[in-house]
Amino acid sequence: MRHGQWGAGTVLSQDGDRITVLFEEAGYRTLSLDALAGHDDLLTVVRRPGRDESSS
């Protein structure tokens, strides 16, 4: 995933509506999925877990 300000990150866990992400530049952050709703430009999924680029 990529955050508009914190750069590239990896989702480490999910607990209810919260995810913990390790960002390369900003370190660990816990984010509320409810708070992110409606802010499509804030986070970008760059690769979904369990899916390689050859699958359709």
Image (cartoon, helix red, strand yellow):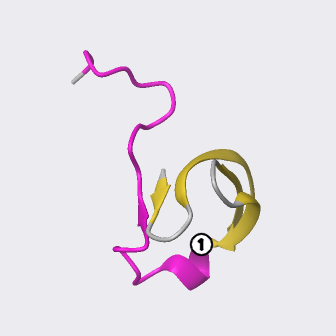
Residue, far front? 25
Q: Where does the image place residue 6, in percent across and percent down from the top left?
A: 56, 64
In the displayed structure, 2 sits above or below 34; it is above
* Residue 16 visible (yes or no): no
- The quadrant holding residue 47 is top left
Q: Where does the image place residue 1, in percent across and percent down from the top left?
A: 48, 50
What's the residue at 34%, 74% (across, down)? 41
Which part of the image, by quadrant, shows the C terminus? top left
In the displayed structure, 56 sits above or below 28; it is above
- The quadrant holding residue 38 is bottom left
Q: Where does the image place residue 10, in percent across and percent down from the top left?
A: 61, 44
Callout 1 crowding tier (Cα within 10 Å): few <14, some 14–19, many ≥20: few
The kind of secondary structure element at disc 1 is helix
Q: Where does the image place residue 49, in percent across and percent down from the top left?
A: 51, 32
Write the start and end of the magenta stretch as one range: 33-55
What's the residue at 50%, 71% (across, down)? 5
In the displayed structure, 33 sits above or below 29; it is below
Q: Main secondary structure of the magenta part?
A: loop
Residue, far left? 56
- According to the picture, the residue beneath numbered tag 1 turns out to be 33
In the figure, is residue 3 to the left or right of 33?
Answer: left
Q: Amino acid at mark 1?
A: Leu
What's the residue at 75%, 66% (across, down)? 30
